[in-house]
Image (cartoon, rainbow, N blue to C red):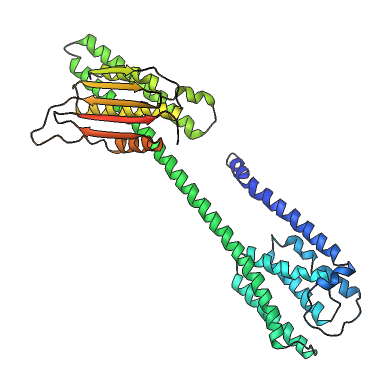
Amino acid sequence: MIASVPLAVRSWPAWWRAQQASVKDGALAATLTALAFVPTLSVIGAQLSDLPKRPADALAVVLTVAQSAPLAFRSRHPAACLAVIGAAFAVHQALCYPQTFASIGFYLALYTAGAQQSRHRRTLAAAVSAGYAALAIVLSQLGSPNRISDFLAFYLVLVVLWMAGAGMRRGRAEEAERRRLAALAAGADERARIARELHDVVTHHVTAIVVQADAAQFLVGTAPQRAGQGLAAISDTGRQALTELRYLLGVLEATGDAALTDHTPALGSVADLVEQVRMSGQPVELTEHGERLPRPIDVELAAYRVVQEALTNAVKHATGQPTRVTVHHRAGHIDIEVITDGVAHAEGPAVPSGGRGLDGLRQRVHMLNGELTATARAEGGFSVRALIPSRSTA
């Protein structure tokens, strides 16, 4: 019962479209049937035999209705609709009844079958062609003055109608394929974004917890008080990690709760982030220049993640080395620079491997029309710098 509710919700648009199509088809069938009995419109109908006409009778009325009324189910059963209307049209022509406007239904049924018939399309086309050939032979035997070229010209009209419907079908299929590919691309982008968020949250906090746990284990026998502070830091780091993970889960659930935005890490939380890293034993200095201005949430989050990833790499690759975080609040953009000292290498410094963290940051900043660079320093260590425009363009 629980699983059937989302399924019913998902199928509701398709059901509603089917109902709308049925109503339109019914209205078309009723209109064409009514117009078929308007004498002045009979000259518009199809005329194939050109034989002397016999007076209309009850059978003529039945055949007239049979050429228009089945259009009421043309969308749901296009092949059956075409079969009934085609048979009625053939009998009407063979019995030499007067021309009727209802014969337009044969054209509409043929176009609909070309556009909406999904199975056995070639078989249906072959059956229509064979039926038309049989009708042409019958009319010729009855003495129709039409030549083979005349019958071929009418057949070409039928082919054009079928191909027009087939072209419409291909257009709809291509549009559906474009929408499917767009949905897949959007889903891939969203999964990549969530993966970056999870990487930023989990890697940073788990790295901090590991460093703090190692420090506490080292100090438990020599400095119990400092070891207790380390354990408290582990607890605080774990709580913050749980808070951010709950926020991500809330986004995945798409509950629409506006309160979730309040838990999004922002640039104003950098001071707490720096303090957390200090508690891990990493000497970090934070300097901010300029007045902090209100900015879009994705800009704030990107700036926060830049500092977070840079500090995570500092803890992982340059444990205990001084790190300086500088944030410039400018009118048009935010300028962030994180410099971590290190020991110079004899063969030249190597850029620390940021893995998917730095790659994800570059993508995030690039989506905001910003720039991010991560380089090794000649004297050892590395630096991360980001320039993020204040206006969101994602």
Q: Out of 382 and 280, give the one closest to the viewer.
A: 382
- The residue positioned 54% from the left and 27% from the top of the image is 257
Q: Tell me the residue at 92%/79% (across/down).
A: 55
Image coordinates for residue 175, horizontal then vertical, percent? 55, 55
| Residue 133 visible somewhere in the drawing | no
Q: In the rendered image, which quarter is residue 173 located in?
A: bottom right
| Residue 310 seen in the figure | yes
Quadrant into which the C terminus falls:
top left
Name the image quarter holding residue 325: top left
Q: Foreground residue, 379 or 278?
A: 379
Q: Identify whether 343 is placed above or below 279.
A: below
Q: Position of residue 263 (x, y in %)?
A: 45, 23
Q: Residue furthest left?
A: 346
The image quadrant of residue 382 is top left
Residue 190 percent across, percent down from the top left: 44, 40
251 sits to left or right of 382: right
Q: Along the horizontal axis of the image, is 5 left or right of 232?
A: right
